Amino acid sequence: MSSDQPFITDESRVVTQTRDSRMEGQGDRFNSRLREAFGSSPFILTKFDKFLNWCRGSSMFMLQFGIACCSIEMMHTYAVKHDLDRFGSGVPRASPRQADVMIVPGTIVSKFAPRMKRVYDQMPEPKFVVGMGSCTISGGPFQEGYNVIKGAEEVIPIDIHVPGCPPRPEALVYGVVKLQERIANGEAAPVTVKPYELEEFSDLERDELVETLADQIDEDELVMRYNFADSP
Amino acid sequence: MGTVQLFPEFVSETLGLSGVLGDVVGSLVAAAVVGNIVLAFTGVAGPWAKRKITAAFTDRIAVDRIGPFGLLIIPAAAVQLLAKELIVPEGVDRPTWDLAPLVLPASALLGFSVIPMGRLGPVNLQIADPEVGLALVFAFASIASISLVMAGYASNNKYSMLGGLRAVAQNLAYEIPLIVTAMSVVIFAGTLQTSGIVAAQSDVLFSVGGFDVPTWYAFVNPFAFVLFLTANMAEIGRNPFDIPEAPTEIVAGYQTEYSSAYFVLFYLGEFVHIFLGGAILAVTFLGGASGPGPESIGFIWFVVKLWGFFLFTQWARSALPRVRIDQLIEIGWKGMLVLSFANLVLTAVIVGVIA
Amino acid sequence: MSLEVPDTTETDEVPERTPDELAALLGDLVIDRDDHLNAPGFVIRPDAVQETLSRLKQEAGYDHLSLVTAQEYENRYESIYHLKKFDDPTQEVSVVVPADKDRPVSESGEAVFRTADWHEREAYDLIGIEYDDHPDLRRILLPETWQGHPLSMDYDKDRPQIATLPEHANPLADHHRDAESDTMFLNIGPHHPATHGVLHLKTILDGEQVIDVEPDIGYLHRCEEQMAQSGTYRHQIMPYPDRWDYISAGLLNEWAYARAAEDLADIDVPEYAQVIRTMGAEMCRIAAHMLALATFALDVNGDFTATFMYAINDRERVQDLLEDLTGQRLMFNYFRLGGVVWDLPEPREEFFSKTRDFLDQLPGSVEEYHDLVTANEIFQMRTIDTGILPPAVAKDYGATGPVARGSGIDYDLRRDDPYGYYDELDWDVVTEDGCDNYSRLLVRMREVEESAKIIEQCVDLLEDWPEDERTIQANVPRTLRPDDDTEIYRAVEAAKGELGIYMRADGTDKPARFKIRSPCFSNLQTLPEMANGEYIPDVIAALGSLDIVLGEVDR
């Protein structure tokens, strides 16, 4: 469990609010009420944990989720030649309620980020995310774009990054299998807090931008605020 | 029917119990055994066989890393899904929302109570054999559509709503031809009792080179068989009639909002329904548990027929496009209904002339 | 539907008007001339756009508004309407509409060409020009709450922005509040299994019937034009076209840029390289059409069915060939200005025999698809006579590619505005006149066979090409600096239709304005025409038959 090893950060390198908020509040996703009740981790529960982790790692339902270029390679990964289903993780579900893993295959832009956050929030815990391609790491070739979120991790936590533009299907298979391995070993995602959260408009700090938009947006409408200057 | 001992009676006799206690214990044990057999089938079918069969149709391998032939995916998938968070969305209509996933598998499992599943050694795997057996099984099976409507309505989701409404329209359009076609079987057999219908199919129709072709109604009246098969596919909502779910149109239809255990129940219910559809088909048209060999292995033949039907549904799923909702209803009301009545008249004439 | 202009031009020969004749036709609407490399350009009064466009359309036969480019100069704003003829796309004219720097307003051309609707909205969104008389001038690619116009000169990229996640209201709710009928608003997308990416359809339903659908795009607006404007002509732009239409149509897109830039900088491409380009491009077309077939089967059949898997498998074969040729599976980056980056892979015989093997098995697979898909009666029931797009409407919206050819419009730039090696080869333009979902699919499937014919001829040519004449690149200066204020608009036939590039050089090694004419952008605009009044499954099928790629729609 990752909670056994505290997440080590180099304080000096935390320079921005954006990065700062990433480091806080990482919790243990596998914590069960049962274990809370027992207080510690008795033998039977650790065995049960192990079994559960094995189950979670062995069978995963993917979210049928296509964004950009990488989704084409993702389709190939599901299809005949590469057949992700061999590893027990090749059944895409259209509804986020029934999915365990979300492969984020492409560039996230300002208009889509709140929607992706919403889809992620709709998935039941424990949920895992595979970031596919350079765009989900940093914005990739489009990082300079005025509209591009600099990596999916700005919005949702990512467990496995598969680099490439786009990664080959083999790479995605490797990434997914690595994820399965990590889940089976009980390693949770190290990052859980996101700087770009959905929040109600009235909760935003009143600055020039908020003042300008005040007559267009309802107080209780959900919004996402982008601090492009502050992004990595 | 005094000649055939039913499963609960066998249990109570074996345990040496009699009276009310014997009835209760016998029924419970019998129901548990039959229920578990069916659930075991669905357990194998859902996470494993469905994937393997689809993969075979599409030149893939599918699960093969987890256990032999990937069989361990079955416990893994079951536990994994059950161990997930159960999301209850805001605005759902409880308790309807919670009941819907229970009603679906329950209705299908209830249907199995009157299905004669054949003999396995000394045991006759049939829980009850009422005189209105066939009517009862259709009644049970059609409760399923209520479950879909409940789910669609209570989910507070527009896609679910559309799925639920589609389910009603579809079931209305196909239930009637299904039952009217089944009536032709009743005319042949002269009874509604499921065991009676099976018994009526045990004669020899004709012999080809020493091989006896039995009077299975599929051979006696192939036209009715095809009609029934089609209506049955619509009834259980499989391709090309899977429109209440229609993944690419309305996401996942009535089950869009369901996660975790409730989703498992729906998934389970769907598969139990496929098997119930297969069981009804086997009883009415394929001679129930009859087949070559001694009567005591009849159950094996019955299982083969169930899985044959399951294979057929998966074949259709891989190959056939989905019809549109208005076309489906048109086929149902304008095509199937007329044909099924024609079949009924035809059967009545044949039976009247011959008998 | 606006069917005001019936298609009357039956003859193949369209009389070409000289620029002076056009100037005479437009009379005093013209205030200046601003010729582009590809076409004569007329600067007109900002309040006479409709008059000019309708004269050019009705009297001179320019019935295809290919693109509207907007840009900002130091002293003015400018919208350029690039007009062409469907019967002969080499006849082009540019209508240049200047707008005031302080208050950029000009008249909308929407009343003459429906397609101007979205193009002008985009110009408003990214540049900030406002269009009088426009029916619905809103942002199209960026969130409605966006501050500033990102491609205008004074835009600050680092300013914070806010995007909303609004609950959508039913805009027709008030109109249908009678006892008998009630409507329902349904969001299809941006995350939905049938939207082929991140498209949002604002759908209004009456029962299962769609009474209004409005595509809402911009969920994949990756600033492709900004990216290209900040790259140098010679090397830095070429990788980006691969990512516009990412359904492995990479080489076709690269060709669009290569063609425009080569014409702008006056570079000749060696014949050998042209043959390789033609062959590679047609392989890409096969791959793209296979995916179109696969996803269409996904939309109509549901789930990951046999058709989907088989089509992906065939794509895999083409991708293997393309990987041998270019070194990458999807983002090829294989073209260079003046040629291609390297010669065919060694040993050449192996590559040729692999290609021939592929071509040999292709008719068999196409036959299989016909058995599995187009000959299936349920499939025909679903797709024939649904999603009707009449030719006149298609032209009004500037639809091109298989969408236009499925409506019987005989328009293919490979033949009508020849480039590469196409005019030396023997192949046919495929059209179907059913105007429905089925025709559009058939066009794609038959185009696959035509592409195979082209590839075969290219392989024959390449096999016999003398070894000492295999020049793969022309001599191109290390840094390209086209002359100041030269402008060009060039298009090629990509997998989805007419893919055009407008470029304005300002004397530096980077384009001052780089505008992409995406075929999918125009094709998607026709969706409401096809979908209104149909059932939900038909909308999904119509969307599938349009074969859009959001990367190209949003750019």
Image: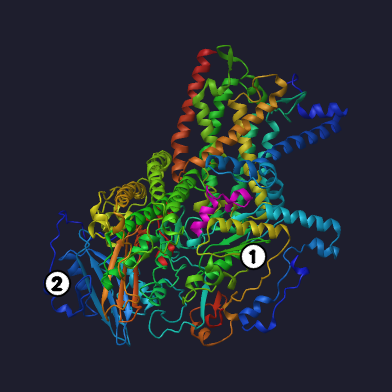
- Identify the subunit bearing mark 2: C
Q: Which residue is mark 2?
A: C19
Residue type (three-letter) at the residue carrying disc 2:
Pro
What residue is at 25 percent from the left and 71 percent from the top?
C266
- Quarter of the rendering containing residue B158: bottom right
Q: Position of residue A227 (x, y in %)?
A: 54, 81
Q: Which residue is mark 1?
A: A159
Q: State the separation of the CA atoms marked 2 and 1.
A: 62 Å
Residue type (three-letter) at the residue carrying disc 1:
Asp
Q: What span is in magenta?
A: A71-92
Residue C156 visible, this angle? yes
Apparent side of residue A129 relative to residue C339 in the rendered image (left or right): right
SS for callout 2: helix
- Quarter of the rendering containing residue C216: bottom left
What residue is at 56 percent from the left and 43 percent from the top?
B55
Does label 1 lie on the same chain as label 2?
no
Residue C188 visible, this angle? no
